[in-house]
Image: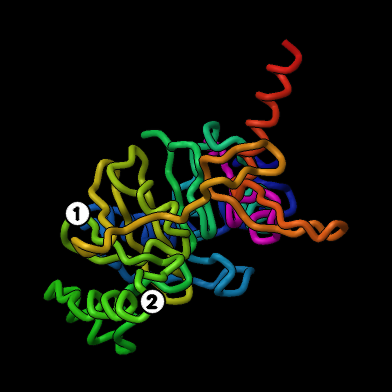
Amino acid sequence: MNKNGASAKYKAYAFAYLNENTKREIRRKILKAIAIPGCQVPFSSPELPIARGWGTGGLQISMSIIGPGDVLKVIDQGCDGGVNAVNLRNLLVKTTGVKTTYDTLEATIVQTRHRIPEEPLGEEQILVLQVPIPEPLRFVEPSMIKTREMHAEMDYSRMLVMLYEDIVQWGEITLGARYPSLVNGRYLIDPSPIPRWDVPKLHLAETLFLFGAGREKRIYAVPPYTRVEPLEFEDHRFRVEDFHGMRCSRCGSSDNYMNEIYDSVSGEKLYICSDSSYCDKRIKSREVNDDV
């Protein structure tokens, strides 16, 4: 390790890989995004040694805010062992030397792709979300110029029409992820491809949520204790996924988001917790209770 804690192999690079001028620029844009909750703020989005579309936006935010005393957790769709999570974690560790953890509650910075952890985050934590498409109005308007005008005028009628047409055709709103949500009663955001299950976790949360889209060069934020309300109608309320009657085949949980899998031997359909840390904790807790 060098004096900054980074791996000796990477000592020619600045701490956390990015140069200080780039990190200062990104931090300024983060502060602007926090000051105007939900507003998309453009940033430079420099090149990184990973391809765009693999989490460069979230990675650049993490690289800009991380310090030697931070504890890092990186997850991919709730799992600490996903390919995306492992590679991003390795890059950050090699260029910073920070401590890493699989425990959500131990981390000061959690970088995630497509999930928000099941355990509630606290005021001392920051959740960084990787975002492929930051523009929620892309569903109804392909022109970036037009979508900016719509945000400026708070004109979200076409999005409501799209949701209404979904109800007319299917009897309910069928969006499974990227559910459009209004921040602080002003800006509509794409909460990244998190499932509907995770959207209520943004509302009045204690932690700071930072969203980074590297390919489209946009940063936006949901500060602590901010209202986040998914779009809905009086007669068709927003609802999360229904896992009633389903239990995790590992820990037995029935009150969290689960993935559906198939046993390759028996062909039986099983369910397993999406959040691997939450699942492992429940198993350890059960083992301790059994021993007692």
| Residue behind mark 1 | 184
Q: Kindly state the secondary structure of the residue where label 1 is placed.
A: loop
**Quadrant placement of the C terminus:** top right
Crowd class of label 2 (few under 14; some 14 to 19; many from 20; radius 10 Å): few
Q: Residue at x 29, y 62 (%)?
A: 181
Let me know if residue 56 is in the magenta part: no
Q: Nearer the viewer, residue 150 or 18?
A: 150
| Residue behind mark 2 | 170
Image location of residue 276, percent across then percent down: 64, 44
Residue 178 occupies quadrant: bottom left
Q: Tell me the amino acid under the disc marked 1.
A: Asn
Could you tell whether 80 is left or right of 161 in the image? right
- Mark 1 or 2, nearer chain start: 2
Let me know if residue 77 is in the magenta part: yes
Could you tell whether 213 is left or right of 292 in the image? left
Q: Residue at x 60, y 38 (%)?
A: 253
Give the magenta-colored segment's residue range.
67-86
Tell me, yes or no, if residue 276 can be seen here. Answer: yes
Image location of residue 162, percent across then percent down: 29, 79
Tell me, yes or no, if residue 100 can be seen here. Answer: no
